[in-house]
Image (cartoon, rainbow, N blue to C red):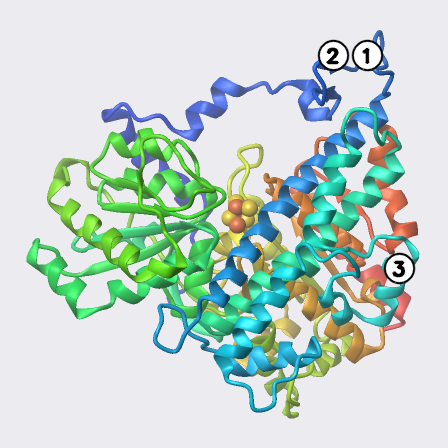
Amino acid sequence: MGDFKLTTVEEFEAATDRLLETGAKVGADSWQLRVKRQTPHCKFGEEGTCCRICTMGPCRITPKAPRGICGCDVHGIVGRNYLRFTAGGSATHSDHGREICHTLHCTAPDGNYKVKDPEKLIRIAKEWGVETEGKDIYDLAHEMAELALLEYGKPFGTQRFLKRAPKHTQEIWAREGIEPRAIDREVATALHMTHMGCSSKPEALIRQALRCGLSDGWGGSMAGTEFSDVMFGTPKPIETEANLGVMNPDNVNIVVHGHDPSLSEMICEYADSKEMIDYAKSVGAKGITISGVCCTSNEVAMRRGIPMAGNFLQQENVVLTGCCEAIVVDVQCIFPALGPLSKCFHTKFITTSKIAQMPDSDFIHFEPETAGENAKAIIKMAIENFKNRKPELIYVPQMKQKATVGYSFEAIVKTLDTVANSHVDEFGTTKPLVECVNSGVLRGAVAMVGCNNPKIRPDQAHIELMKKLLANDIIVVASGCSAQAAAKAGLMDKEARNLCGAGLKRVCELADIPPVLHMGSCVDISRMMVLAAEIAKDSGWNISQIPLVGCAPEWMSEKAVSIGNYVVATGIDTYLGVEPYATGSTEVDNLLKGGLADWVEAKFTVEKDIDKLVDLMIERIEEKRVALGI
Ligand code: MSK
């Protein structure tokens, strides 16, 4: 095993404690302190039994007051809250996708954004029935951008990407009336259905939650992923590093955070230029280090090998190191706390999107048309801030792990193909993977996704679940903050294959892969949908029959609920470590954890005990194997 050793959660926590000591010296607040002040949480909120959709209330449901003023019962209230939560997540992911489509429309041979993967663009154009022959690639990009934008508001029809699903899945969606139409329409319908005096029937509300989720996973998110690949390149395996130790006190440190790669790509591009490096040296730094937090980090790690400083609950830690010249954010999962926190240090908190404007930040409006200038201005601001450091506050935990990342769907089929020594066709095949599962060399796969949540010891659930799955010959594909937890621990180092059972270890050796495959950001869970769809087509199994489950043990956001809905609606059983705000209604709760299986052949399981959660997943994978007779 050489010198390889996983970094433990205890070591993460010791590093955080040391950083919080610095924070205490300068009077900084922290999420750890705010959790204490916010606990215990409101029971009505947690159970989803508070309704504040009109101003006759708010109404809270209790045994003595079983109906709201309008007469809505607890099932209607919980169902409406669940649907609104989903709509928030679906809108957020999909709007990210829309921004990417707009950026695609700005591509030009001599512009800030170019078409880096023309083959992929042509492939999607053919899939959508667009003539490609003899067309200039930029004309095609603009035409595809317009068509993709129309997916958000077209008056008729359903999402174009649904055709990627196996026939059986498409039939289920049609039968259940959950095929998503225009993306914006599904969000608007969700808000309309939950307005005062509209739906209060749990079945109708949950059905729309699935539909709205599907418009995200097989609509907006898929567009975000696919067209990001077209502009910034489809990820391929690449080496990087993860955890706070990637920050270099000798350099100007710029941390990119959020989700949209349009800005971070530009920052990485210009930070690498001689002009900027020379400028950094002129102020006494040795160079510039860009690192990332959350999914912006995943995006640039997957395509450029930019190191990952940390995940969701580590965002304050990068400022606490005292050597972060700028934390530059785009959209989603950004703590407003970064504003006041950065004021305790020399750090510039730079917001860039009208979607995410926050107090105590410097706002530099980032737009695709002026991307280059905006990126340069941001980097210069960070460089000029280097001199304002307070040396006595600098402490970077010497903690980092190597990671191989960049396993897009295309990269996975290409890489795993080497196991069977067969040849990939134009679009690749998952047959070698299917053979490994069929023969039992691999027992199955788990798609690990989602955030951190202070309700769960941060990162521990992700890491412990993965370790047990690997030991049981179950391969893990990961995205979002789950992927970063794995990378920080060392589970994306190829050496981690020694933690696997004999079968998975052999696959990792033959294919030269780490046992946990980094598939990208939250929107990139759409890559996992494509992978599941292709496995189903190559194996002849239905998606719900594949020994595959989804898992989000530490999830926290509305986006995660939207994801959960589309993963389940695609036929993949999904295991959660945190309850959605739905336990207040037996009808909604039973539907989510049972009844959904009658509609879409999959359901949710929620288990807060992580040891039990992983055992339930392994059991389910083995059950599926038995049902398949393999
Ligand atoms: S960043 S949604 S905390 S995965 Fe995509 Fe992480 Fe969850 Fe945000």
Q: Secondary structure at mark 1?
A: loop
In terms of sequence position, does the residue under pointer 2 or pointer 3 come before the other? 2
Image point (42%, 60%), residue name? 262
**Residue 497, can we see it?**
yes
Mark 3 CB near ligand 1 (8 Å cut): no
The answer to which quarter of the image holds residue 275 is: bottom left
Q: Position of residue 10 (x, y in %)?
A: 44, 42
* Residue bearing the label numbered 3: 174
**Residue type (three-letter) at the residue carrying disc 3:** Ala
- Report whether 198 appears left or right of 415: right
Image depth: mark 2 or mark 3 in front: 2
Helix, strand or loop for disc 3: helix
**Residue 601, quarter of the rendered image:** bottom right
Nearest the eye: 45 or 628: 45
The N terminus: image quadrant: bottom left
Q: Are marks 1 and 2 in contact (CB under 8 Å)?
A: yes
In the image, what residue type sits under mark 1? Ile
Q: Is residue 624 above or below residue 455?
A: below
In terms of sequence position, does the residue under pointer 3 or pointer 1 come before the other?
A: 1
Camera-nearest residue between 155 and 501: 155
The residue singled out by tag 2 in the image is: 56
Between residue 394 and residue 626, name the one nearer to us: 394
To which residue does mark 1 refer?
69
In the image, residue 70 above or below residue 505: above
